[in-house]
Amino acid sequence: MLKSEAVAEEILQDVFLIIWDTRNKLDPEKSFCSYLFCIATNKCYDYYRRMVRDKKLLQKLNGLSGYFDSIDEDVINKESSAILYHAIEQLPPKRKLIFRLCKVEGKSYEEVGLQLGISPSTISDHIVKANLFIKDQIIKQGHYVMDDFFIDK
């Protein structure tokens, strides 16, 4: 049903955990094979439902061009916006300012460098470090980061 040995093994492990947790409630007069099959089938359906949900979220977030190049509140749903905003707020003050000027306001590295009196290469370094920090924060909050977007685990 799953066409993936790794996913099948993971679901099998979940099935055995469920059976172990409910072992005291099992009725020995009822078919254990049917019970086992029912749990496994439901776990497979859950897996596919989760995949559909994740695919829909990926399609929503796929409209983003580049790694947070243009943060558009109309494209990002409220939850994703809150997660991203929280991660940005945790940046050091100067890095947060540079990130906002470049990524939110869309200014070039040269424009920001002139405004703040620092070189474009320093701006680039701050942006790279900010992107890595934000990615790490999103992962720590329980989301996967895939290419240019993130999804729930």
Image (cartoon, grey):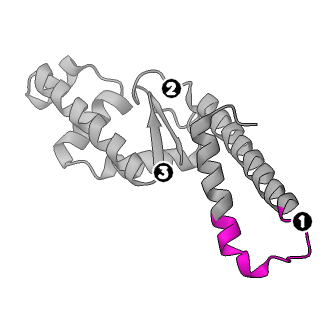
Foreground disc of the pair 1, 2: 1
Residue type beneath disc 3? Ala
Element under disc 2: loop
Tag of residue 111: none
Classify residue 8 as left or right of residue 89: right
Q: Residue at x 43, y 45 (%)?
A: 84
Examine the rendered structure and indicate whether residue 51 appears above or below residue 21.
above
Residue 124 spot, x, y in % from top left: 19, 24
Other-residue count near label 2 (Cα within 10 Å), few / some / many at <14 / 14–19 / ≥20: some
Disc 1 secondary structure class: loop
Closer to the N terminus: mark 1 or mark 2? 1
Task: Point out the stretch of residues depicted in magenta.
Answer: 17-32
Q: Which residue is at a point 43% across and 54% down the rendered structure image?
A: 141
Mark 1 belongs to which amino acid? Ser
Residue, disc 2: 64
Query: Could you classify mark 1 by the number of other residues whose Cα lies within 10 Å: few (under 14), some (14-19), or many (20 or more)?
Result: few
Could you say whether the residue bearing mark 3 is in a helix, strand or loop? helix
On residue 82, the disc is 3
- Marks 1/2 in contact by CB < 8 Å: the verdict is no
122 displayed left or right of 129: left
| Mark 1 lies on residue | 31
Q: Going by the image, does 116 lie left or right of 35? A: left
Q: CA distance from mark 2 to mark 3?
A: 16 Å
Up-down: is 41 above or below 121? Answer: below
Give 102 or 121, whichever is nearer the viewer: 121
Amino acid carrying label 2: it is Leu
Q: CA gap, disc 1 to disc 2?
A: 51 Å
Percent position (x, y) of residue 29? 91, 76
Viewer-closest of 29 and 87 = 29
- Is 27 magenta? The answer is yes
Q: Taking 109 as reference, is 14 left or right?
A: right
Give the CA distance from mark 3 to mark 1: 48 Å
